[in-house]
Amino acid sequence: MSVLGTVIVGVVILLGVIGAVVQVWPSAPLVGGAILVWAWLTGTTSAWIVFAIAALVLVLGTILKYVVPARGMNKAGIPQSTLVWGALGGVVGWFIGLPLGLVLVLGMIATTFVVEYLRSRDTATAWASTLQALKAFGWTIAIELIAALTSATAWGIGVALAATGN
């Protein structure tokens, strides 16, 4: 693969890593897709092994980013419906406040608080549930970021191997 092609793949991977943090575009498809293109155009066995490792990490990260926060919410006694309403509030906040990703979080926080307040009729309980939802959102970002960075690191090692002829 040419140097320019490698740089373009690196930029797309970087956009995927940024997407893991800002949560405005999907991280795993960008990172995985870029590494797939690199492996295809590089064509070596080591490139395909790097892609397989990255794909495995990204799939595992995608599964964990939903399972881990949901478990925490369930342990705290917060129903799944609160998560659904919070997600919908985040989506509405995102569309209202484009291109500010912060509005997504504010929409999620406000919606989660209102739903939990309506459910419990207690401000302290609603706020505790909202904080738990924020922790879950933080875990989602952390897990997705770790998966993206791990895949990017595997790709970097693959580029180094390809440069040495392996």
Image (spheres, rainbow, N blue to C red):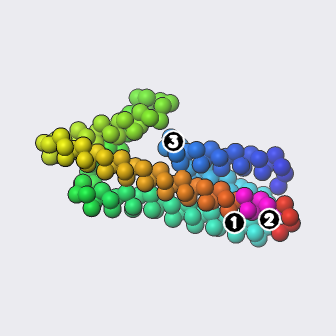
Mark 2 — residue? 161
In this picture, residue 10 sits left or right of residue 165: left
Depth check: give the residue in front, 86 or 146: 146
Q: Which of marks 3 and 1 precedes in the sequence? A: 3
Mark 1 — residue? 50
**Disc 1 and disc 3: Cα gap in Å?**
26 Å
Mark 3 — residue? 22
Considering the whole magenta stretch, tell me its main secondary structure: helix
Residue 10 spot, x, y in % from top left: 71, 49
User: Is residue 106 at least partly visible in the picture?
Assistant: yes
Task: Give the extent of the magenta segment.
Answer: 156-162
Residue 154, above or below 127: below
Residue 106, above or below 49: above
Q: Which of marks 3 and 2 precedes in the sequence? A: 3
**Disc 2 and disc 3: Cα gap in Å?**
31 Å
Mark 1, residues whose alpha carbon is within 10 Å: few (<14), some, or many (≥20)? many
Residue 18 spot, x, y in % from top left: 58, 44
Kindly indicate whether the residue at mark 2 contacts the one at mark 1 (C-beta within 8 angstroms).
yes
Residue 15 spot, x, y in % from top left: 62, 44
Q: Which of marks 2 and 1 precedes in the sequence? A: 1
SS at mark 2 in the image: helix
Mark 3, residues whose alpha carbon is within 10 Å: few (<14), some, or many (≥20)? some
Residue in the image at 59% along x and 48% along y: 17
